[in-house]
Image: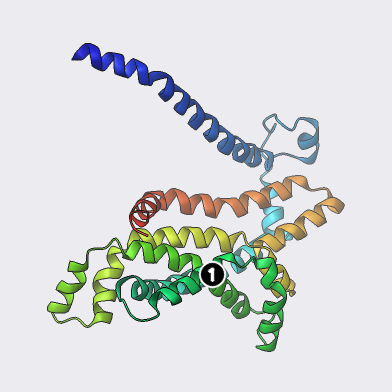
């Protein structure tokens, strides 16, 4: 028996070595550019062009001061944070209620409504730009936080409902039935019982929406024109144009690091919940 196990293990060894080599290669392809970006943000312009791959001779933290203050990345950061947090919170609130009803309550037209939401996934944002511009303008919400947030919510609902509906289908019906027997109304059963245990699915949807809205450029470019309301992607694009004239490439790299850090931090803190949500949501369609 022991000999057979050894033979099987040896037979699987080349495949495992290849798998680990691919994983290490992928990790390197992801981590090394981020590391290069970080230490390049601490270089002077001369160092960036003279020795782009070398470590900085001394850290130039003033690059971050320039990006945060003079380039107004701090203001754009606050704008993006406010828009993203409000948008994600409202997306989860509306999507969770809609997904729960569509996943757990059979009624006439249920599938039609569900597939109508899914149809929204097939609409390219470039195709919706012009109608959205005129719609938001007619509502007098152009160049406002409210207008941008409403557009982000509308565009994110199809994907979020799809993810959460699949997750709610995996939850045991007995929990909701027990809550109803104990005297809860259907809405109380949702808020007090089903929604708390759907935390992994909510975290998964929150991370994907956070990343999408935090890095979104096109809608913000069309709907926002006032400089003080710009989001981080718009601010970075402006910083890139300014860099061509001021030649502060270290400041530009520092701005990129500032944009990147919140997404890395969110993923690092919530990666366990993200894995659970994706795994559970994949069990049922």
Q: Nearer the viewer, residue 19 or 284?
A: 284
- Say left or right for 118 vs 252: left
> At which x and y percent is residue 83?
57, 70
Residue 36 lies in quadrant: top right
Q: Quadrant of the N terminus?
A: top left
> At which x and y percent is residue 178?
15, 72
Q: Coloured how? A: rainbow
Q: Quadrant of the C terminus?
A: bottom left
Residue most extreme to the left: 182
Q: Secondary structure at mark 1?
A: helix
Residue most extreme to the right: 245
Please name the residue shown 39% across and 65% down the image. Answer: 164
- Say left or right for 55 vs 261: right
Residue 5 lies in quadrant: top left
Residue 243 position (above or below residue 125): above
Residue 184 lies in quadrant: bottom left
Q: Nearer the viewer, residue 236 or 117?
A: 117
Residue 53 seen from this side: yes
Residue 127 position (above or below residue 208): below
Please name the residue shown 71% across and 62% down the image. Answer: 235
Please name the residue shown 59% across and 51% down the image. Answer: 260
Circle 1 residues within 10 Å: few <14, some 14–19, many ≥20: few
What residue would you read off at disc 1?
Answer: 119
Residue 72 seen from this side: no
> At which x and y percent is residue 281?
36, 57
> At which x and y percent is residue 249?
77, 46
Please name the residue shown 66% across and 82% down the image. Answer: 136
């Amino acid at each position: 028996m022991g000999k057979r196990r050894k033979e099987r293990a040896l037979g699987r060894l080349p495949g495992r070595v290849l798998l680990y080599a691919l994983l290490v290669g992928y990790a390197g392809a992801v981590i090394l550019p981020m590391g290069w970006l970080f230490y390049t943000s601490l270089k002077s312009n001369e160092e960036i062009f003279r020795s782009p791959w070398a470590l900085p001779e001394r850290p130039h933290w003033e690059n971050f001061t320039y990006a945060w203050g003079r380039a107004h990345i701090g203001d754009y950061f606050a704008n993006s944070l406010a828009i993203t947090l409000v948008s994600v919170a409202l997306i989860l609130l509306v999507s969770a209620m809609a997904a729960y009803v569509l996943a757990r309550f059979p009624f006439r037209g249920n599938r039609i409504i569900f597939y109508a939401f899914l149809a929204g996934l097939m609409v390219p944002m470039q195709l919706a730009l012009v109608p959205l511009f005129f719609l938001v303008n007619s509502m007098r919400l152009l160049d406002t936080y409210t207008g941008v947030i409403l557009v982000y919510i509308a565009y994110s609902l199809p994907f979020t409902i799809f993810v959460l509906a699949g997750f709610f289908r995996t939850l045991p019906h007995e929990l909701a039935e027990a809550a109803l027997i104990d005297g809860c109304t259907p809405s109380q059963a949702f808020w007090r019982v089903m929604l708390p245990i759907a935390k992994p699915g909510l975290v998964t949807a929150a991370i994907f929406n956070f990343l999408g809205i935090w890095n979104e450029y096109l809608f913000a470019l069309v709907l926002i024109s006032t400089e003080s309301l710009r989001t981080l992607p718009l601010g970075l694009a402006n910083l890139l144009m300014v860099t061509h004239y001021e030649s502060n490439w270290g400041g530009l790299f520092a701005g990129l690091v500032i944009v990147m850090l919140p997404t890395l931090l969110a993923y690092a803190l919530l990666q366990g919940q993200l894995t659970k949500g994706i795994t559970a949501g994949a069990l049922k369609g």
